[in-house]
Image (cartoon, grey):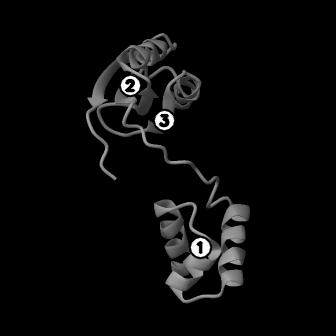
Amino acid sequence: MPDKTDELIIRLLSANSRASNTEIAQKLNMSESAVRRRIGNLVKSGRIRKFTLDVDDANSSSAITWVSVNPSVPTSDVSQKIKGVPGVVVVYETAGQFDIAVVLQGANVVELNRSVEGIRRIGGVISTSTAMVLRTIR
């Protein structure tokens, strides 16, 4: 089970996945080999599933689409189908007014609209509500 040091390593990697083991070790006052071992254990345990790329998306469009699912259809089935729609970045199953939140990204609004239409055609989807992202602050 990850401890406080593992959580600090995860935070540092979340902020900069390109940080070297040496850089992390210096920030945490640890040896490079201890950091390497801990990262390896976090990957092996599944706590860290992948290292991702953060790109400048200033020239693309993003949206968040909320999805309501028919109660007779398992939400997880709909989520899996949504995951396969082009332009879908991430799918969250949620509690509240909507069952699913979907983050979309595309080159322009036309591509985003295609993604939303793809989601609407999935069996079990009752309705969608989409909000365009105006600016991302990190």
Tell me which label, 3 or 2, sits earlier in the chain: 2
Q: Hey, what amino acid is under mark 3?
A: Val
Q: Is 33 in front, or is 41?
A: 33
Q: Where 91 falls versus 14 (above or below)?
A: above
Q: Answer with left or right where residue 102 lies relative to residue 74.
A: left
Q: Residues within 10 Å of mark 2 (few under 14, many from 20)?
A: many
Q: Which residue is mark 2?
A: 67
Secondary structure under tag 1 reads loop
Q: Answer with left or right where residue 31 lies relative to residue 110.
A: right
Q: Are marks 1 and 3 in contact (CB under 8 Å)?
A: no
Q: Residues within 10 Å of mark 3 (few under 14, many from 20)?
A: some
**At which x and y percent is residue 99?**
39, 31
Q: Which residue is mark 1?
A: 2
Q: Is 7 in front, or is 1?
A: 7
**At which x and y percent is residue 2?**
59, 73
Residue at horizontal 30 percent and vertical 49 percent from the top: 137
Secondary structure under tag 3 reads strand
For the residues marked 3 and 2, what is the alpha-carbon distance in whole angstroms?
10 Å
**At which x and y percent is residue 38?**
67, 75
Q: Hey, what amino acid is under mark 1?
A: Pro
Q: Hey, what amino acid is under mark 2?
A: Val
Query: Could you say which disc has been placed on residue 47 in the image?
Result: none
Q: Which residue is mark 3?
A: 91
Q: Is 79 in front, or is 18?
A: 18
